[in-house]
Each structure stands twice: as structure tokens, then as C-alpha cells.
Amino acid sequence: MSNYKKLVFSGVQPTGNLHLGNFLGALKKFVSLQKEMNCIYCVVDLHAITIFQDPKKLKENVLETTAGFLATGLDPNKSIIFNQSSVSGHAELAWILNCVSRLGWLNRMTQFKDKAGSDKEKASVGLYVYPNLMAADILLYKATHVPVGADQKQHLELCRDIAQKFNNDFKAEDFFPLPEPLIQKNISRVMSLRDGTKKMSKSEESDFSRINLKDNADDIIKKIKKAKTDTLPIPDNEADLKKRSEALNLLNIYGDLTNTSLTEVLKEMKGKEFSFFKKKLSDVVVEVVCPVGENMKKLMKEKSHLDAILQKGKEKASNIAEENLKKIRSIVGLI
């Protein structure tokens, strides 16, 4: 990895309703990474259309996701911010990598099975080869590091396999780096407020299952008040939370937002009832989330500004992508 310039790549799907899980699981990390490394952050609209999207809504969601990037602290002067479909190299490299990747590898991808549901015959081909496009997103820029959650780790392993096979097949030793995962330490997976065994998701039917970044203070307080817990007080050790997934989720959220370990949270809150704790949690969530939501709403009134940022990012990304694609075409034998 020492022969490559350190570069971070990550993307967020523009599916609307950015929520607390997106903030803690991705956006907060993005902001800290831009202080340490060169970063490319992409609104991955080509990934979004693996499942049918309303065209007008998709365009709006691209801008809203961009607003979310900026509202949480991403700086377009420090990081490259653009939407995936504006750089055609993503699709071109994805096709080349489709011809390198193996069916057996894709058959092992668990996310396809989860997203396709019980009737896999009706799923789009795009959803099936989605991991190859993800690999193309990363390798197009020769990114060396990718922030990933537990559910994306398998896709990054596939990306590394594809990069290695490309290098071997075309005797292009070390052309593509083998990207390293950046796994957030001390950050817990944010779960649904209604079911502590399910990930917080914008696709869940009940809006009370998540804290949206655009929720106002009253909405946040109401959702946390109604969040599922149990009748037991907060324990003084982690072992007693093993079968209390909803309780654990709320305590983890509090810890992640206050940069406090679960052990320290339990030390502070032991013996307290959840009615007391939920008020404390509400105060913290309102303090962190509401300014982000207000910034997003302001930015969405300045769509020409968002368009300009995406255009500037597209130009920067295209320059890197085209330089790498020229070499890739030559290696593969394309004119």
C-alpha cells in the first residue's frame, strides 16, 4: 500500500430521509477523515436505481444527500463531493470489472439475498452486480481506504479480490491497490427505535422507528419518548444488556453522541429508570441533530449552490477517473 497515495472513497445512496444511523455510521466519520486524508465522497445515484426510483424524487434526493454532506461539516474545498452518474467512468469500469469478477463470488453476497427478498427471479440484474459497481467506484480512483460498516465488509473483500484478479490476469502488478477497510471503533450500529434487532432504516414503514436529520425538536422528543424499552432499570454492567436489545440501542446512541464508552454511560446511569434516561437522551439528540437539520433545510433553498458544488466535484473526480481509465483501457486492450 506504500506505493499509493492515501485516498478515501465512500458513497451514500440518495434514497431520501437521512437519519441518525447515517449520521453516526457514516457522515460523522466522513468529517473526521477529511481532516486526516484526501477524500472523495459520492452520492451514488447509480446504485439507487437498482430498485426503481421516481425520477423527479431521485433528483431531489441527490440534492438532499448533498445538503446532508455539507450540513454535517463536509467541506467541498477539502473533499471531492459529486454524484456518481455525472462521471461516466463508473459505469465503464463496472462493465470491465463485470468481466473480471466471477459468478461464484457474487453468489456468496448476502446483501443481494436480503434485498431481493423471497422472489429473487424478479430482482434486477443491476441489484445482482451491484457489488461490482461498488468495486468500480473505489478502484476508479485507486482509493486505498474505505470506511465500512459490518454490512459492507463483504463487498470490500470482493473489491480486493477483483483488484487482485485484474492485476494478475493482465500482468499489471500492483496497478490497483487492495483497499483497506476503515472500521469505526467505539461506534455501535444504530438500530430501530421500535425493534432493537433491526438496523435503523429509511425504508421501515413507521417514522417512529428512526430519528430523521430533518426532524424538529418536538418530533425527536416524541420519538424517543415512544421508543421501545423494558420495565427494568439501567444495569451497571454490559452483560445484563445482552437480551435487552432496545435498551442497549438507546444507551449506545447516547454514548456515540457524547463520545462516551458504554461502560462510562452505565456508570453514569446505573439504577436510573428509562423515563429519566430518555429525557437526557432527547436533550443530547436535539443538541446534535437539530442544527444539522436546520442547515439542510437552508441549503435545500439554495439548489443552485448545491448544483455548483456537484459540478465542481464532478470536474475534479473526472480528471482523476479519466487519467486512470486511459491506463485501464490500455492494459485491457481497448482502443
Image (spheres, grey):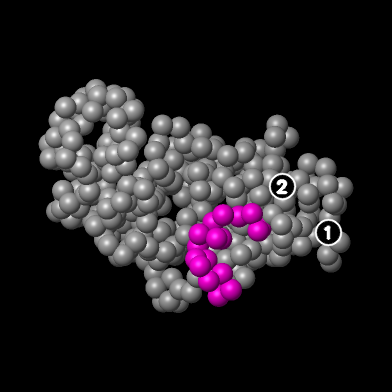
Judge the density around disc 2: few (<14), some (14-19), many (≥20) Cα neighbours within 10 Å: some
Numbered mark located on residue 139 in the image:
none
Residue at screen point 64% across, 45% down: 157
Residue 324 belongs to magenta span: no
| Quadrant housing the N terminus | top right
Depth check: give the residue in front, 54 or 113. 113
Residue 234 can be seen in this image = yes
Classify 10 Å Cα crowding around label 1: few (below 14), some (14-19), many (20 and above). few
The one of 73 and 160 positioned closer to us in this rendering? 160
Q: Measure the alpha-carbon separation of dots 2 and 1.
A: 18 Å
Identify the residue position indicated by label 1 in the image: 332
The three-letter amino acid code for the residue at tag 1 is Val
At label 2, the amino acid type is Asp
Q: Residue at x 76, y 62 (%)?
A: 99
Q: Please, is residue 314 above or below residue 249 in the view?
A: below
Drawn side of residue 305 relative to residue 323, left or right? left
Q: In this rendering, would 156 be left or right of 335?
A: left
Q: Give the quarter of the figure containing the C terminus.
A: bottom right
- Residue 255 placed where, x, y %? 30, 33
In this picture, which residue range is highlighted in magenta?
106-123
Residue drawn at point x = 70 percent, y = 38 percent: 4
Per the image, label 2 sits on a secondary structure element best described as: helix
Query: Toward which corner of the image does residue 294 lie, by quadrant?
Result: bottom left
Q: Is residue 82 visible?
A: no
Q: Which residue is mark 2?
A: 161
Residue displayed at 54% across by 38% down: 182
